[in-house]
Amino acid sequence: MVFFVAAGILSILGAVGMGIVTIVMILFSFAARHGAFDTPTNPELQLSQGAVVILFSILAVLFLIFTIVSIINAVVYLKNTNKTYDQLHENSGKIITIIVLSFLIGGVVCGVLGLLGYVLKTNEPLKTETGVEANVMSDELAKKLQQLKEMHDNNLISDEEYSKAREDVLIRI
């Protein structure tokens, strides 16, 4: 589904962006350790060199976590792109968790796309391996079973013929 693909791509782009920021924060942390940043002259904003190092280190860890979560989001979105309604709802807890994380980390657009992908997936008809809609195929099979039952009830076919024909129809499912 297009919404899961879009959310997956946005998650990948977010992971790349956050990865770059993580690298920058690590570099700033190393630079701060070696005194590359001047402390502010305003006494209210006075930060020691150690505080600056800790600040950049914490930011680096946070952005690293955001990067990892964005990669996980992308994997889940892209893995669920071609899932059927039933398959999607078997894993609904995981998908809803990823949608919430997308809102928190990936941004509103990524979360909305994931939510749309989840909600709109429920309205798509199921497809079989041959591409025929499952509900159309099941209607045809139900009609054939009904015809067989009527033929059997009217004694047009024997019990043995009925059982064999019914089994042949059910095998197609």
Image (spheres, rainbow, N blue to C red):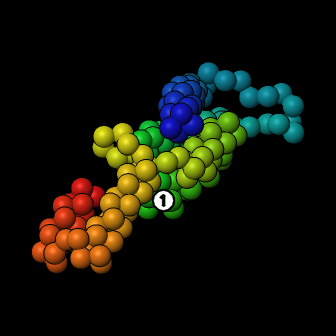
The residue at 30%/78% (across/down) is 153
Q: Quadrant of residue 110?
A: top right
Q: Quadrant of residue 132?
A: top left
Res 18 visible: no
Tag 1 residue: 89
The crowding category of the residue bearing disc 1, from other C-alpha atoms within 10 Å (few below 14, some 14 to 19, many at least 20), is some
Q: Measuring from the top left, give residue 133's x and y in whole percent.
A: 42, 46
Q: Measuring from the top left, give residue 8's x and y in whole percent.
A: 51, 35
Q: Nearest the camera: 154 or 106?
A: 154
Q: Is residue 136 left or right of residue 160?
A: right
Q: Nearest the camera: 119 or 160?
A: 160
The residue at 52%/30% (across/down) is 9
In the image, farthest residue toward the left: 160
Secondary element at image label 1: helix
The residue at 60%/46% (across/down) is 120
Q: Number of labelled discs?
A: 1
The residue at 36%/39% (across/down) is 131
Which amino acid is tagged 1?
A: His
Q: Is residue 50 left or right of residue 47?
A: left
Q: Height in image: 131 above or below 170?
A: above
Q: Measuring from the top left, give residue 85's x and y in whole percent.
A: 47, 54
Q: Is residue 104 left or right of residue 19?
A: right
Q: Nearest the camera: 87 or 125?
A: 125
Res 129 visible: yes
